[in-house]
C-alpha cells in the first residue's frame, strides 16, 4: 500500500451499466495503468435498485490488478462514515461525511483528522487540505461521455495531487477513496 497511489493524477472510473447489481469502480494511475478495483461484496435485488433503497451498510472490496485484496471499505449510512480496513482487520482510517455531502473529513487509524475535502456548491470539485497545510489535492467529477451520462448513473472522477506537499501513503489512500464514498453517499445506489 505504500506506493499504491503514488501518482500525481489518479482516475476513478465507474463502469457504466444500465441495471448494475452492485457498485464497482476502477482506479487508474498514469496512462491506463489499472491500480485497483472496488467492488461491492453483496448485490441488490431488482426491486431495491428500482426503488433506490439504500442498504444500511455497504461493504466494498478494494483489490489490486491481480485480484488480491488490499483493503475493505465499509460505508455505514446511519453514521455518515466509511471505514477503510486492511486485510488483517486493522482500521486504516475513516472518511466522515458531513450532512450536506459537500465536506468529507479524513481520519487516520489513530482517530486524528489528517485532511478535509471540501466541495463547491455543485459538488463537482473538491479541495483537499490537511491541518495547517496548504491544499495538496483536488478531486473533480469529470464528464463521462454522452452515452454514459445519459443512459447510466455511472460517473468518472480525477484526483490530482500537488508536488508541493508530501502526502503520506495512508492519507493518499483515504483521498483516493473520497470519490467512491462521495458517489455512494451523494448519488446513492448504482
Image: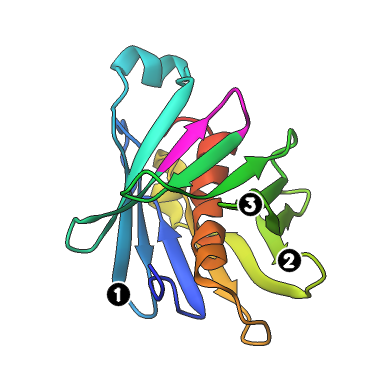
Looking at the image, is 182 positioned above or below residue 48? Answer: below
Residue 123 visible within the image = no
Front residue (pair 36, 46):
36
N-term-proximal mark, 3 vs 2: 3
Looking at the image, is 138 positioned above or below residue 52? Answer: below
Q: Which residue is mark 1?
A: 33
The answer to which quarter of the image holds residue 185 is top right
The CA span between labels 2 and 1 is 28 Å
Residue 124 visible within the image = yes
Element under disc 3: strand
The CA span between labels 3 and 1 is 28 Å
The magenta stretch is 73-80
Placement of the C terminus among the 4 image quadrants: top left
Q: Which mark is residue 130?
A: 2
Q: Residue at x 29, y 34 (%)?
A: 41
Q: Residue at x 31, y 33 (%)?
A: 22
* Location of residue 39 in the rendering, given as x and y in whole percent from the top left corner: 31, 43
Q: Which residue is mark 3?
A: 107
The answer to which quarter of the image holds residue 23 is top left
Amino acid at each position: 500500500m505504500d506506493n499504491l497511489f503514488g501518482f500525481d493524477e489518479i482516475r476513478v472510473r465507474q463502469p457504466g451499466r444500465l441495471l448494475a447489481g452492485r457498485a464497482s469502480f476502477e482506479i487508474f494511475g498514469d496512462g491506463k495503468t489499472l491500480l485497483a478495483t472496488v467492488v461491492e461484496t453483496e448485490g441488490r435485488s431488482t426491486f431495491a435498485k428500482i426503488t433506490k433503497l439504500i442498504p444500511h451498510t455497504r461493504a466494498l472490496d478494494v483489490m489490486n490488478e491481480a485480484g488480491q485484496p488490499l483493503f475493505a471499505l465499509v460505508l455505514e449510512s446511519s453514521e455518515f462514515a466509511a471505514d477503510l480496513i486492511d486485510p488483517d482487520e486493522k482500521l486504516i482510517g475513516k472518511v466522515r461525511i458531513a450532512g450536506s455531502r459537500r465536506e468529507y473529513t479524513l481520519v487516520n487509524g489513530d482517530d486524528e483528522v489528517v485532511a478535509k475535502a471540501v466541495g463547491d456548491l455543485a459538488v463537482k470539485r473538491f479541495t483537499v487540505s490537511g491541518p495547517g497545510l496548504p491544499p495538496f489535492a483536488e478531486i473533480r467529477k469529470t464528464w463521462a461521455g454522452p452515452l454514459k451520462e445519459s443512459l447510466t448513473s455511472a460517473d468518472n472522477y480525477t484526483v490530482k495531487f500537488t508536488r508541493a506537499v508530501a502526502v503520506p501513503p495512508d492519507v493518499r489512500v483515504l483521498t483516493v477513496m473520497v470519490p467512491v464514498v462521495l458517489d455512494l453517499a451523494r448519488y446513492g445506489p448504482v
